[in-house]
Image (spheres, grey):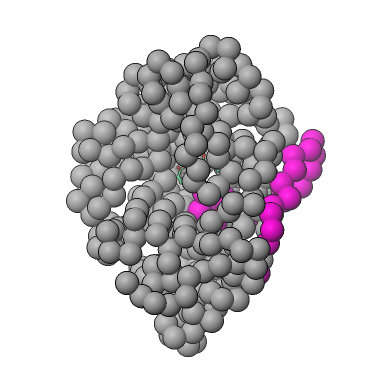
Amino acid sequence: MSCAPSLVDSFGRTISYLRISVTDRCDLRCRYCMAEEMTFLPKAALLSLEEIAIIAERFIARGITKIRLSGGEPLVRRDVAELVRRLGRHVGAGLDELTMTTNGTRLAEHAEALVAAGIRRINVSLDSLDADVFRHITRHGDVAQVIDGIFAAKRAGLAIKINMVALKGLNEGEIAPMLEWCGSNGFDLSLIETMPMGAIDEDRADRFLPLTKVFDDLSKAFDLSRDDHRSGGPARYWRVGNHGTRLGLISPLTANFCDGCNRVRLTTEGKLYMCLGQDDQVDLKSVLRAEGVAGLDAALDTAMRLKPARHDFQIAPGGAPAVARHMSVTGG
Ligand code: SAM
Ligand code: SF4
């Protein structure tokens, strides 16, 4: 274990959780996430696998105990399995947990390798169980392929949390059935409010569904009791009485929990963002390329001074995104 000082920001929050976007590319085009004609970064702009690993390992030395690989779709990056294996060596030796958020399209082929590398839990995005609604939301996705991937992951021994973005007029009638489905399959469920990140082809306000309303409806149909679990993010948790599923509500718009924030995010081109909803960043790729690993500690200390108190997300009809970059760039 390193004795390098841990990462504490200027508001006294200890940073213990790093999310890494390993690619901004994706094989789906979810309407709330991306424009149909999305422009992706040129490959030359991306961190190499080795650079991602070096940066992640410096974070581990500075006290990060949890890393989530995300994107874009992490499983479309060709060398991702190698990165998972390399970071997996730190699980139990600095890292408490290595995990991933995926859209599930390629899970069937990767699930066993993820387990072999030390991953125990994953989040899989699934906004609808209905083939037509799923295809509409993702613009061309095949829900059967994702469900196959989810069950392959379950068979491989991974614990699964389903992420579902609550979308007015699209999947709002499917939230209670999704909670039932998760309960009967042993999965947890997190519901997410759509966040104003990056330009898309529609007005997010038209699809914004406040989770306060969703929760009121769910509590009439399910026996929900508060669960004290905290992940250091904008989620609050409940247990569903009859099947024990943990229900998370990720509601940055209707409830702000930035006071307890424990995370920072590394983009695929090496920029470290200290807040999903703000533009403050430190360019770790430039530091690493100019000064080597030795330069990273000072850059991380600068980042801690720059971490803002909170996001300022708001959704209003016709309103501009709070930040220009998409969630897929920062790693959701
Ligand atoms: N492609 C993977 C997936 O979909 O799970 C990982 C990346 S995706 C950006 C991570 C999570 O962010 C997904 O659960 C997705 O639904 C969510 N997401 C993407 N854009 C969002 C937005 N604008 N507001 C809220 N959630 C969003
Ligand atoms: Fe791709 Fe995930 Fe964004 Fe959907 S939410 S377009 S799967 S990155």
Write down the quadrant of residue 10 in the picture: bottom right
Residue 183 location in percent, x, y?
38, 21
Q: Nearer the viewer, residue 150 or 304?
A: 304
Q: Nearer the viewer, residue 153 or 33?
A: 153
Q: Nearer the viewer, residue 112 or 183?
A: 183
* Start-end of magenta stretch: 306-332
Residue 218 location in percent, x, y?
56, 18
Residue at the image point whose x is 23% and y is 54% from the top: 117
Q: Main secondary structure of the magenta part?
A: loop
Give the number of callouts: 0
Residue 18, compared with residue 34, is above or below; it is below
Residue 92 location in percent, x, y?
27, 59
Residue 224, compared with residue 80, is above or below; it is above
Residue at the image point whose x is 51% and y is 23% from the top: 225
Instruction: Give the quadrant of the N terminus.
Output: bottom left
Q: Nearer the viewer, residue 27 or 10?
A: 10
Residue 229 location in percent, x, y?
47, 39
Write down the quadrant of residue 122 in the picture: top left
**Relative to 13, 110 lies left or right:** left
Residue at the image point whose x is 49% and y is 79% from the top: 297
Residue at the image point whose x is 50% and y is 43% from the top: 230
Residue 176 in sight: yes
Membership of 280 in magenta stretch? no
Membership of 308 in magenta stretch? yes
**Relative to 163, 303 lies left or right:** right
Residue 133 in sight: no
**Relative to 70, 217 lies left or right:** right
